Image (cartoon, rainbow, N blue to C red):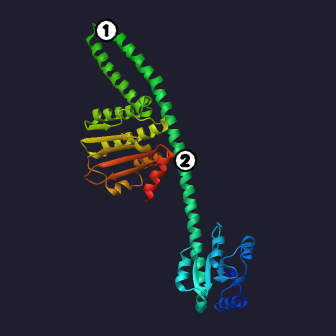
Amino acid sequence: MADNATPAPIRVLHLEDSEIDHQLVALTLRKHGMAFAMERVETLEDFALRLEQARFDVVLADYHLAGFTALDAWALLRTRAQRPPFVLLSGAIGEAAAVEAIRTGLSDYVLKDHIGKLPHVIMRAIEVWQARQDQARADAELAASERRLAALTEHLQTSIEQERAAIAREVHDDIGGSLAAIRLDLAWIARHSQQDAAMQAHTQAASEMLQHALEASQRIMMNLRPPILDQGLVAAIGWLAEAFERRTGVATVLAAPPAGVDIDKTLALVAYRTAQEALTNAAKYAECNRVAIDLSDGEGVLTLEVSDNGRGIAPEALAKPRSFGLRGLAERAKTVGGWLDISSRPGSGTTIVLSIPLDAAAAERLAQGESA
């Protein structure tokens, strides 16, 4: 069913000290078929009062008025959060001055000699204003959504780390304890079956499998909640590098401050998980023979850089919807006020850089550098 409702009239606040000019504006708008409701004010005080009392779709203002100018009215209007578009209509200002006034934020201008353009200018100003309002609302909704996502990410990461710690304790207390008991039983069997070669062979095989299970449980515990983090971030990442080199055969070099890095456990865990994921990706995909890890905390910023000389990552691979590993690292970095940069070209290796400001001054300095 068609919507035949009559559109609401455009509400115009006209700042004009000439009744004749006011009537000329009304005549022009009616001539062009515009539905409007317009009222005139002459003083800056009445202008401010009407803005407080009612809502208008557009402000139309002469330039020279008694004791003030349209720019004074605009200065008053621009302080309002929900201000309507402001159109300058004057015959006493040159075009160059009108353009200069537009640069202060006015929506548009019309010379009184060309008043026939006024309806079109008003409609365009309202449309542009509405588009900006819609964009501002969309930006605010996006910012709110990003804040909610950041809060959810932080909550999920905290929950994941708590669950990892709980699982690590169970592995240590239950599985580790059971494996230790089995080792004692196997040792007893080995002592009491020295004359049975077959039994000795089975006992030896079981002992080797048990040793493998013990090493696996220790490795799982370290991955879930590395106690080595209690010795500091440098020690923890050093352990990661050594384990990676031993497991993959890839030469791995760590450069870090000799005195270590003094940060809280939350930041240390973010850096550790970033290094862990970067090394995992290098082992899976890079096909490299060298990895360099650089850790520093200079100028109030914790920086972790993991570089390999492998085959690199294609741009389309980074943009894959299911690239959760690296995307998760970026979200994790945001939860502590940091960010993640990934630099890679096919055939030229990959560099992953985590940056976390350690104080407000560093955060502001880096933000200014980003916006420059």
Which image quarter: residue 108?
bottom right
Q: Is residue 57 left or right of residue 200?
A: right
Q: Amino acid at mark 2?
A: Leu
Establish if 251 lies above or below 329.
above
For residue 8, say whether it is visible: no
Tell me which label, 2 or 1, sits earlier in the chain.
2
Q: Which residue is identified by label 1? A: 193
Q: Residue at x 59, y 78 (%)?
A: 125
Q: CA distance from mark 2 to mark 1?
A: 59 Å
Q: Residue at x 57, y 65 (%)?
A: 136
Q: Is residue 75 left or right of residue 139?
A: right
Q: Is residue 186 left or right of residue 336?
A: left
Q: Which residue is identified by label 2? A: 152
Residue 34 x/y as whole percent: 66, 86
Establish if 130 lies above or below 249.
below
Q: Nearer the viewer, mark 2 or mark 1?
A: 2
Please name whichever residue, 344 or 360, is drawn nearer the observer in this view of the structure: 360
Please name whichever residue, 360 or 191, is drawn nearer the observer in this view of the structure: 360
Establish if 64 lies above or below 158.
below
* Within-10-Å neighbours for mark 1: few <14, some 14–19, many 20+: few
Residue 102 x/y as whole percent: 55, 77
Quadrant where the C terminus sits is bottom left
| Residue located farthest toward the front when viewing the structure as drawn | 67
For residue 25, say whether it is visible: yes
Establish if 290 lies above or below 344.
above
Residue 115 x/y as whole percent: 61, 90
Quadrant where the N terminus sits is bottom right
Q: Amino acid at mark 1?
A: Ser
